[in-house]
Image (tube, rainbow, N blue to C red):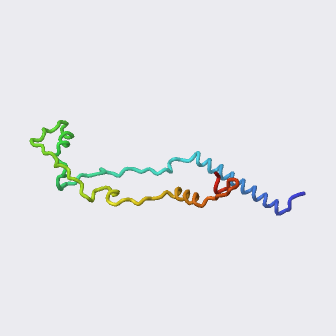
Amino acid sequence: MPAPQSARWVQWAGAAVSGALILGVIIWGYRLAVRDVSGVPVIRALEGPARMAPSDPGGDLAAHVGLAVNEVAGSGLAAPGPSRVVLAPPPTGLSADDAPMSELKPLPQVENPADAEERRWRARRCRCPTAPCRRNPR
């Protein structure tokens, strides 16, 4: 039995759309394969130096200038040792507030929920004299 006239038009429209999609994919693939790289933007550096030293630097010396480690890095030789060595003061003890929290205030006892449920189940379990049941598997 031949298809009605409206169904044939729908079939032809579907075939045309499918053909257009296939043709579009072929054209897109060709353009992708042979595209020119001249469309890729090129970023060039600016003219002149990237950084310039100030004409009047001014400012203060940093706190770490003049340390012995800087002398090693600058000249490659270690600086002579200091004429006087002073040891650090002894450490201070802990105050009463520095004790562990468990010693300051005892922690409450926390019960495991699974253990509590087990105890409740055992307290109300079935005492059937017959075969084991769901609550008392024995």
Return the residue found at the far front: 129
**What x and y, as percent, mark residue 107?**
38, 59
From the viewer's perspective, tell me whether residue 87 is left or right of residue 41: left
Residue drawn where x is 27% and y is 57% of the image: 98
Return the residue found at the far top: 77
Q: Give 2 or 102, whichever is nearer the viewer.
A: 102
Quarter of the N terminus within the rendering:
bottom right
Return the residue found at the far right: 1
Residue drawn where x is 78% and y is 58% of the image: 12
Q: Give 78 or 15, whichever is nearer the viewer.
A: 78
- Residue 4 lies in what quarter of the image? bottom right
Q: Give 133 or 95, whichever is nearer the viewer.
A: 133
Give the vertical position of 70 relative to 9 (above or below): above
**What x and y, as percent, mark residue 119?**
54, 58
Give the vertical position of 75 relative to 111 (above or below): above
From the viewer's perspective, tell me whether residue 7 is left or right of residue 104: right
Residue drawn where x is 19% and y is 40% of the image: 74
